[in-house]
Amino acid sequence: MTIKVGDHLPQATFRVMTAEGPAAKTTDDIFAGRKVVLFAVPGAFTPTCHRNHLPGFVTQADAIKAKGVDAVYVTAVNDVFVMDAWLKASGAEGKVEFLADGNGDFAKATGLVMDGSGFGLGTRSQRYAMVVSDGTVEALNLEEAPGKADLSSAENLLKSL
C-alpha cells in the first residue's frame, strides 16, 4: 500500500555520514516532534536528480525553512558513501541533509518504489516531495514519471506550506 496524506511514516533506518563515519538515523530521530520536508530521488548524480530536482531545494531551503520547517532532507536508494559524495559535490551542505536508504527499506515501507531495472538501477524510490509533521504526512507531491521533477519541485512544494 502506498502512503498517503494523513498517514504516519513507517519505522525505518537510514544511514547518514558523520565526522566519525556512517551512522544510523531512524524515522523517529528525523521526524518526531518536528516539521520536515523530505524529497526523494531515484538516484544520486542521475541527470534529473542532480541537475533539476536537488538544486531547487538547495536554492529554496531558506524560503522553505522560513515557513516553519525545521529541516529539509533528501533520500535515495543509494549507499551512504554515494550520498555523502553527492552532498559534497552538490553544494547542498548546510541547506539539505542527505539520507541513504541503501536497501530501499524506507521506499518499500512507504510503497513509493519504482522498478529501474530497465536502466540497470534495480529497485529505486519514486520521485516525490512531502511535508511531514511529527511523523504524519501533511502533503505528498508524487511524480508520475521518474524523469520529471515538476510536481515534486521545491517551488511547487512551497505552495503546500
Image: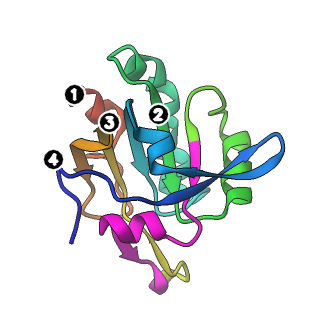
Residue 29 forms part of the magenta stretch: no
> Which kind of residue does numbered mark 2 sit on?
Val
Residue 84: percent from left, percent from top: 71, 49
State which tag comes first along the sequence, 1 or 4.
4
Instruction: Report the residue at 18% width, 55% height from top.
Output: 4
Residue interval drawn in magenta: 98-118
> Which kind of residue does numbered mark 1 sit on?
Lys
Identify the secondary structure beneath mark 2: strand
Which of the image's four quarters has the N terminus? bottom left
Badge number at residue 144: none
**Outermost residue toward the right in this view:** 20
Query: Which marked residue is nearer to the observer: mark 1 or mark 3?
Result: 3
Is residue 150 toward the left or the right of residue 28 in the image? Answer: left
Residue 70: percent from left, percent from top: 44, 24
State which tag comes first along the sequence, 2 or 3.
2
Give the residue at mark 3. 134
Query: Which marked residue is nearer to the observer: mark 2 or mark 4?
Result: 4
Mark 3 closeness class: few <14, some 14–19, many ≥20 residues within 10 Å: some
Is residue 113 toward the left or the right of residue 22 in the image? Answer: left
Badge number at residue 6: 4
